[in-house]
Image (cartoon, rainbow, N blue to C red):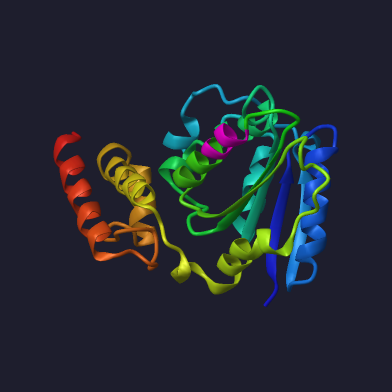
């Protein structure tokens, strides 16, 4: 069955970042995938105001295009998220989109989806932007499937098939082949404790998802030491958090 891939472009100018995404699309067309590319600037996305309504009530106070976008992300089999690098990090439009997914830290609806990140810059910021991407991935519970970066030094270097190997492997092989880091596992345990202790809606979501007794969201490659450490973290946090 064909896999659906959603590619999100957060660059207004449709230049360097968009060019890389077009190259990725052409390479992916060689595989059995259905691809949709959207441009964030075609979407009306209000700034998050920190009201926490999405956490407490399950829906945002704004009725804008973010609702449709989040539904697209949930329905996809894999995601490719991109941003030009402005002042050393992601674009404001990209960050606004991420801010509006606050509820996914509490109720990770994207858990297990492979995500490939893309960034371009004319100067610096690649390392810090990658860290930003990794933080987002961990909080969403997704599978980190690679990072493609281009700067002024190699902006004309075409995207190669090998840069998509990890993404395609996770997309096609399922969740069992993923190896979460100890930090990813710890974030999972933190989120679980918060769900059990602080919010009934979160607790119900985690129970319905079958995650309460899990070391991680799904069965994957986690060695014994990570399992033991993960359980200790959960017990410690559950004890100290009221």
| Main SS of residues in magenta | helix
Where, by quadrant of the figure, is residue 226 drawn?
bottom left
Q: At x 38% / y 53%, what residue is drawn?
A: 181
Residue 58 visible in this rendered orientation of the protein: no
Q: Nearer the viewer, residue 206 or 77?
A: 77
Residue 120 visible in this rendered orientation of the protein: yes
Left or right side of 116 for 205: left
Residue sticking out furthest to the front:
153
Q: Quadrant of the C terminus?
A: top left
Where, by quadrant of the figure, is residue 60 drawn?
top right
Q: Quadrant of the N terminus?
A: bottom right
Residue sticking out furthest to the bottom:
1
Percent position of residue 89, x then y: 62, 29
Left or right side of 183 for 44: right
Q: At x 56% / y 66%, what residue is drawn?
A: 170
Percent position of residue 207, x then y: 33, 56
On screen, residue 68 above or below 28 = above
Percent position of residue 210, x then y: 35, 62
Q: At x 66% / y 38%, what residue is drawn?
A: 66
Give the mark count: 0
- Magenta-tinted stretch: 126-131
Q: Can residue 209 be found in the magenta stretch? A: no
Q: At x 73% / y 37%, what residue is drawn?
A: 151
Percent position of residue 208, x then y: 37, 59
């Amino acid at each position: 069955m064909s896999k659906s891939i959603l590619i999100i472009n957060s660059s207004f100018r449709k230049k360097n970042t968009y060019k890389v995404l077009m190259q990725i699309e052409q390479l992916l067309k060689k595989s059995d995938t259905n691809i949709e590319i959207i441009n964030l600037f075609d979407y009306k996305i209000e700034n998050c105001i920190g009201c926490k309504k999405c956490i407490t009530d399950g829906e945002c106070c704004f009725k804008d295009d973010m609702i449709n976008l989040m539904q697209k992300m949930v329905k996809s089999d894999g995601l490719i998220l991109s941003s030009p690098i402005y002042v050393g990090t992601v674009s404001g439009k990209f960050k606004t989109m991420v801010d509006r997914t606050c509820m996914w830290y509490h109720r990770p609806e994207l858990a297990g989806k492979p995500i490939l990140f893309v960034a371009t810059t004319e100067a610096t910021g690649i390392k810090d932007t990658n860290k930003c991407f990794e933080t987002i991935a961990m909080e969403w519970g997704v599978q980190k499937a690679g990072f493609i970066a281009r700067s002024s030094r190699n902006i004309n270097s075409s995207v190669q098939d090998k840069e998509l190997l990890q993404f395609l492997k996770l997309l096609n092989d399922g969740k069992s082949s993923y190896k979460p880091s100890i930090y990813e596992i710890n974030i999972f345990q933190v989120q679980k404790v918060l769900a059990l202790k602080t919010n009934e809606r979160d607790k119900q979501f985690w129970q319905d998802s079958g995650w309460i007794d899990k070391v991680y969201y799904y069965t994957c490659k986690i060695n014994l030491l990570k399992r033991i450490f993960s359980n200790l973290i959960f017990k410690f946090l559950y004890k100290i958090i009221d």
